[in-house]
Amino acid sequence: MRLFFIFTFLIFSNLYPAINNGNTGNNINSEIVPDNPTKKTQRLFIIERNVNKSIVCYDANILSGGKLDIDNPIDVYWLELATTGERSELNYFQRKMVFGYNSESSAAGCVYVTLKAFAKRKILLVTDTKGIVKPVVKINNDEAQLIKIVVTAKPKLYTSVEFIELYGNDVRSGKPVYEKILNQ
């Protein structure tokens, strides 16, 4: 129930232009972070909502040596696809209550991430043999690389979440996996 309460704020926060943000795209890409030329990012997954086309992006922070930044593993921000198409930062409430995350590193050098609004499932960040960081989570009881989360609010009442959907690819077969979680 907490999940739907927090995602309700996620939906509601997008009703105000100063808080709006977004991006779509399931492909993994890398780019240099503007304020730090020694750090790169790789797209992990996104959150889409039925409110508008703006999305929340979750990118892995990669250090100059090609390793995941264990202390600050994810860069979370809006991609304003509904308006300018530009990046904008999350506000304090969005970082602390809705789109933020907690992380803990393992002895094996992997990082476990828990989303503030979806604490029931830990996401394991693993680096493959090509140096690509992948978010692995259970989707419909399958270990899968998470691609996106879609949040659907009740029409005309964007403060109440109807359901969320998880999309990914099975880590063994590569086949698409999907799970719909109803607000009950």
Image (cartoon, rainbow, N blue to C red):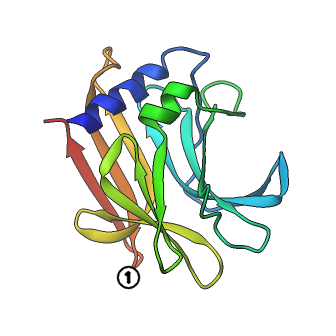
Image coordinates of residue 88 in percent, x first then y, are 68, 32
Q: Residue at x 69, y 33 (%)?
A: 85
Depicted 154 relative to depicted 57: above or below: above
Image coordinates of residue 142 in percent, x first then y, are 27, 71
Instruction: State the image quarter where residue 7 is shown.
Output: top left
Residue farthest toward the right in the current orientation of the protein: 37
Q: Residue at x 64, y 31 (%)?
A: 80
Image coordinates of residue 9 in percent, x first then y, are 38, 25
Q: Quadrant of the C terminus?
A: top left
Depicted 93 relative to depicted 98: above or below: above
* Circle 1 residue: 172
Amino acid beneath label 1: Arg
Left or right placement of residue 19 versus residue 142 in this view = right
Q: Quadrant of the N terminus?
A: top left
Residue farthest toward the bottom in the current orientation of the protein: 129
Mark 1 nearby-residue class (10 Å; few <14, some 14–19, many ≥20):
few
Q: Residue at x 50, y 30 (%)?
A: 94
Q: Residue at x 65, y 24 (%)?
A: 83
Instruction: State the image quarter where residue 24 is shown.
Output: top right
